[in-house]
Image (cartoon, rainbow, N blue to C red):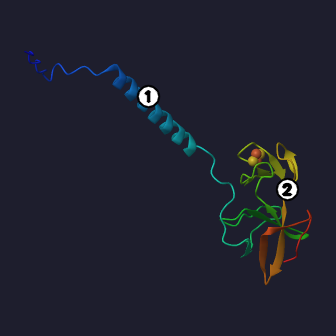
Amino acid sequence: METPRPTRSRLEPEPVPRRDVLGLASLWSAATALAISMLGMLRLPRAAVLASPSKKFRVALPETLASGEAFVPPGRSVALFRDAEGVYAVSTICTHLGCVIKPTAEGFECPCHGSRFARDGAVTKGPAPRALNWLKVAANGGNVVVDEGTTVPQGTKVNV
Ligand code: FES
């Protein structure tokens, strides 16, 4: 005759088998590793090139734009300049790894790895391997039409 097992109280729970403890520990480790890797993915740099419906756009230069001062149209990756010889456009996409560069008093600076460029796009500090692209500009009734998809030789300026 078998003796009945004593029922356990809630204060004395049934012991968890070692296999279950190890299984739960490995599951929690995997879940934690996945969560940490997902957090790491959130910290990755965002796409540097701005989405644009069209590579060609028309823009009016501000009347107060001083000679040698950069004008960056909102949402575009282009800096426009006006000087005595005309208007020209320089791409604001870094030639190192494609980050969007920011205009400074001396020219441009890349926030990603610190490259610096003169106003004409020439590299003044690496690691950028080459000068910024100059983009095609055309006059259009007092406005400027910029074609972000077409590069032109450095020094190409248009009278507006
Ligand atoms: S992307 Fe500009 S310096 Fe690296």
Type of amino acid under label 1? Ser
Left or right: residue 148 compared with residue 154: left
Tell me the tag on residue 121. 2
Tell me the residue at 72%/51% (across/down).
99
Tell me the tag on residue 78. none
Q: Quadrant of the N terminus?
A: top left
Type of amino acid under label 2? Gly
Residue linked to disc 1: 26
Give above or below for 40 relative to 99: above
Residue at mark 2 to residue at mark 1: CA–CA distance: 54 Å
Camera-side residue of 71 and 113: 113
Give the quadrant of residue 146: bottom right
Tell me the residue at 88%/76% (across/down).
159
Q: State the SS at label 2.
A: loop
Nearer the observer: mark 2 or 1; the answer is 1
**Sequence-first disc among 2 and 1:** 1
